[in-house]
Image: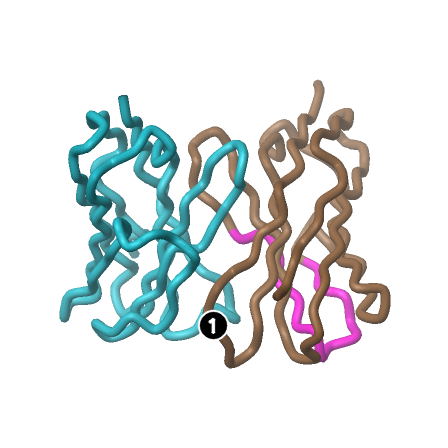
Amino acid sequence: KAGVTQTPRYLIKTRGQQVTLSCSPISGHRSVSWYQQTPGQGLQFLFEYFSETQRNKGNFPGRFSGRQFSNSRSEMNVSTLELGDSALYLCASSPGTGVYGYTFGSGTRLTVV
Amino acid sequence: AQTVTQSQPEMSVQEAETVTLSCTYDTSENNYYLFWYKQPPSRQMILVIRQEAYKQQNATENRFSVNFQKAAKSFSLKISDSQLGDTAMYFCAFISQGGSEKLVFGKGTKLTVNP
């Protein structure tokens, strides 16, 4: 059974650009969540999608957005990149609720220069 | 709002010995779940163990066990017979039942297992 797949693994972008990250959940999982991991702030929740609907959103500016497709694959977009957006972005999936534990991908390492 | 605190930024242990990682949390809720996740250098977060708050019995998964003290809001992880492959960052996490589907993480403990 394939795990959670995130692409790309690494990304370097210039300040002011926009970026799109992709996440394919485990087959059959309908919930996808995104987290930002930085050395200073740790792991912070960005948003969670279930059946193409955003159910929950963290405290991030509107530059951070996401969506989920009918096949449960998810993308997150960051517009007008800032140096502080450099981070590891982790995607996690669950069948429908995270109370049984999310399965995480290996993340996308975004560097903004 | 819930918070999770891991007071040990770094720990080390000798191979085959036992180590305990600490975690405390704060919540006003009665029904919730707690987890320990492991993040090795490969970056992928791996679920180590899960505890349901309404169960008094401490969870155990092979060499990993927890000491869950609900009244004290404490959730420590004990690793027995430590192995080199246990070297990783360990994160304690909290999620509400029927709530926001949001995991709240502690800052993590970097565990090094020495040969």
Q: Quadrant of the C terminus of chain A?
A: top left
- The chain ID associated with circle 1 is B
Residue B62: percent from left, percent from top = 67, 53
Q: Amino acid at mark 1?
A: Ser
Residue in front for this viewpoint, A106 or A76: A76
Residue B57 magenta:
yes
Local secondary structure at mark 1: loop
Q: Which residue is mark 1?
A: B100
Decide if residue A80 is on the left or right side of residue B51. Answer: left
Which is more toward the observer, A22 or A1? A22
Q: How is the image coloured?
A: by chain
Point 77% across, 25% down: residue: B14
Residue drawn 85% across the image and 70% down it: B71
- Chain B appears in which tint? brown
Write the start and end of the magenta stretch as one range: B47-60
Q: Is residue B76 left or right of residue A43?
A: right
